[in-house]
């Protein structure tokens, strides 16, 4: 296991997030940073029949531009939950493992959470159950308050990075829905990996990060 890592909270985080999660002895989740738009903190990317689809959780606009991620509230002015779930079902209902996971995922698109961080944290716990790993992540006690030597990957794992900045992350190819239409699309939401690979997702995540002493 490698040294500790600092990650941002994420909405159905991408494969890269969970590859890093599995390879570090300790994972910190930042809760005292200012909320940043257009990141995985409130969005994920899945694969639909016409290509990648970005699902965004709308948030309540604060009084000022600097609002801590722990204080960001989810907006329900639109029916985004219903729309997200319908989009996910449309994209993956023919995938091998969709029915295996759907009953535990659907409540996230029915229950209303107040805070984005709580919402993401609950999702993460369920995803850890799916991957058969223990959620031992720790929320930071202050901005970037972590153990000495902790790697900061809060901005490394971002949809804004068109080129992978992590030279150890090498996504393993797997069979995706609509593969007859598209070449393999790496680093989508962990949902894509789970729905397509089921229990094999854990092994793929392990192989997706090249670490010292690991092949």
Image (cartoon, rainbow, N blue to C red):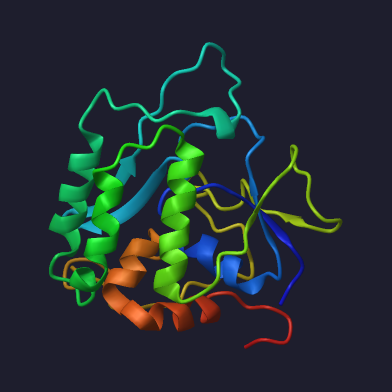
Can residue 42 be seen in this snapshot?
Answer: yes
Q: Which residue shows up at 43% across the image and 44% down it?
A: 119
The C terminus sits in image quarter: bottom right
Can residue 179 be seen in this snapshot?
Answer: no
The picture places residue 56, in percent across and down from the top left corner, at: 34, 39
Counting the numbered discs, the total is 0
Name the quadrant containing residue 214: bottom right
The picture places residue 206, in percent across and down from the top left corner, at: 54, 79
Q: Which residue shows up at 36% across the image and 82% down it?
A: 199
Viewed as shown, does residue 158 lie left or right of 84? right
The N terminus sits in image quarter: bottom right
Viewed as shown, does residue 152 lie left or right of 22? right
151 vs 167, nearest the viewer:
151
71 vs 148, nearest the viewer:
71
Name the quadrant containing residue 14: bottom left
Viewed as shown, does residue 183 lie left or right of 8? left
Which residue is most to the top?
A: 63
200 vs 182, nearest the viewer:
200
Name the quadrant containing residue 111: top left
The picture places residue 113, in percent across and down from the top left corner, at: 38, 37
Q: Is residue 151 above or below residue 215?
A: above
Q: Which residue shows up at 23% across the image and 63% down it?
A: 102
């Amino acid at each position: 296991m490698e040294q500790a890592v600092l990650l941002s909270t994420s909405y159905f985080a991408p494969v890269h997030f969970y590859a890093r999660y599995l390879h570090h002895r300790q994972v910190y989740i930042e809760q005292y940073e200012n909320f940043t738009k257009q990141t995985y903190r409130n969005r994920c990317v899945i694969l639909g029949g016409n290509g990648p689809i970005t699902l965004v959780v709308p948030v309540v606009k604060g009084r000022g531009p600097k609002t801590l991620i722990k204080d960001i509230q989810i907006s329900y002015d639109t029916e985004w939950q219903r729309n997200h779930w319908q989009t996910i079902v449309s994209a993956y209902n023919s995938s091998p493992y969709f029915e295996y996971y759907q009953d535990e995922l659907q409540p996230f698109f029915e229950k209303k959470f107040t805070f984005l961080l709580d919402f993401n944290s609950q999702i993460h716990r369920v995803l850890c159950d799916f991957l058969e790993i223990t959620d031992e992540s720790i929320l930071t006690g202050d901005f970037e308050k972590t153990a000495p030597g902790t790697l900061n990957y809060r901005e490394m794992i971002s949809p804004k990075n068109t080129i992978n900045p992590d030279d150890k992350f090498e996504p393993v190819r797997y069979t995706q829905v609509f593969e007859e239409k598209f070449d393999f699309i790496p680093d989508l939401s962990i949902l894509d990996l789970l729905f397509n690979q089921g229990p094999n997702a854990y092994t793929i995540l392990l192989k997706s990060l090249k670490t010292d002493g690991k092949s």
